[in-house]
Image: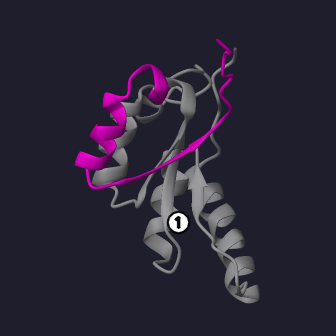
Amino acid sequence: MEKQNLPPQRDLNEFVEAILAIVFAYKPQNRVIIFSSFVPDVCVLLATKQSTYPVFFLTDAGWDDTYSDQRCLALRDGIRFARSAGLHGIVSWLPPLLNTPVLCGAVKQAGLQLLTYGTVRLLAK
């Protein structure tokens, strides 16, 4: 699989500005909004440019090698990044957490919230 090519920082900034402009223009009522991204620099920009909505780092916990950024390669690296960037938490693909439950505790110890995505097949006994 080819590594992800990120646009220049200026383009990321314009991207984030456009998203924020739309969200703040419409100020959705009765909806919970969080921002999340697989791109660490987008998370940093979102957290820096606004404080109304929580920002979470979205990760597949190193399952896919699409991202060459060290912060994306393992959940522990993502936790360190999210904490140092002042993010609210991590959104992780579920299977790595089920395989290594101690990672859930690591997120909590870092003072971060943990959300998950993905499905689990339960085997009938």
Q: Which of 24 and 98 is in front in this view?
A: 98
Q: Where is residue 89 in the image (x, y as percent from the top left)?
A: 42, 54
- The residue carrying pointer 1 sits among few (fewer than 14), some (14 to 19) or many (20 or more) residues within 10 Å by Cα, namely many
**Which residue carries the number 1 mark?**
46
Is residue 49 rendered to the left or right of residue 117? left
Q: Residue, x 66% and y 65% (percent of image)?
A: 14
Q: Is residue 53 shown above or below 26?
A: above
Q: Which residue lies furthest to the left in this view?
A: 109
Residue 1 relative to residue 106: left or right: right
Q: Residue at x 35, y 42 (%)?
A: 79
* Residue 99 sits in quarter: top left
Pick the front one: 43 or 28: 28
- Tell me residue 54's x, y (percent): 49, 68
Horizontal and vertical percent position of residue 75: 41, 32
Asked whether residue 12 is drawn in magenta, I would say no
- Asked whether residue 112 is drawn in magenta, I would say yes
In the image, taking residue 42 as reference, residue 28 lies left or right, namely: right
Label 1 sits on a secondary structure element that is: helix
**Identity, as a three-letter code, of the amino acid under mark 1:** Leu
Q: Quadrant of residue 116?
A: top right
Which contiguous range is marked in magenta?
Answer: 97-125
Nearer to the camera, 120 or 116 = 120
Residue at (67% x, 16% y) in the render: 123
Residue at horizontal 69 percent and vertical 22 percent from the top: 121
Front-most of 115 and 13?
115
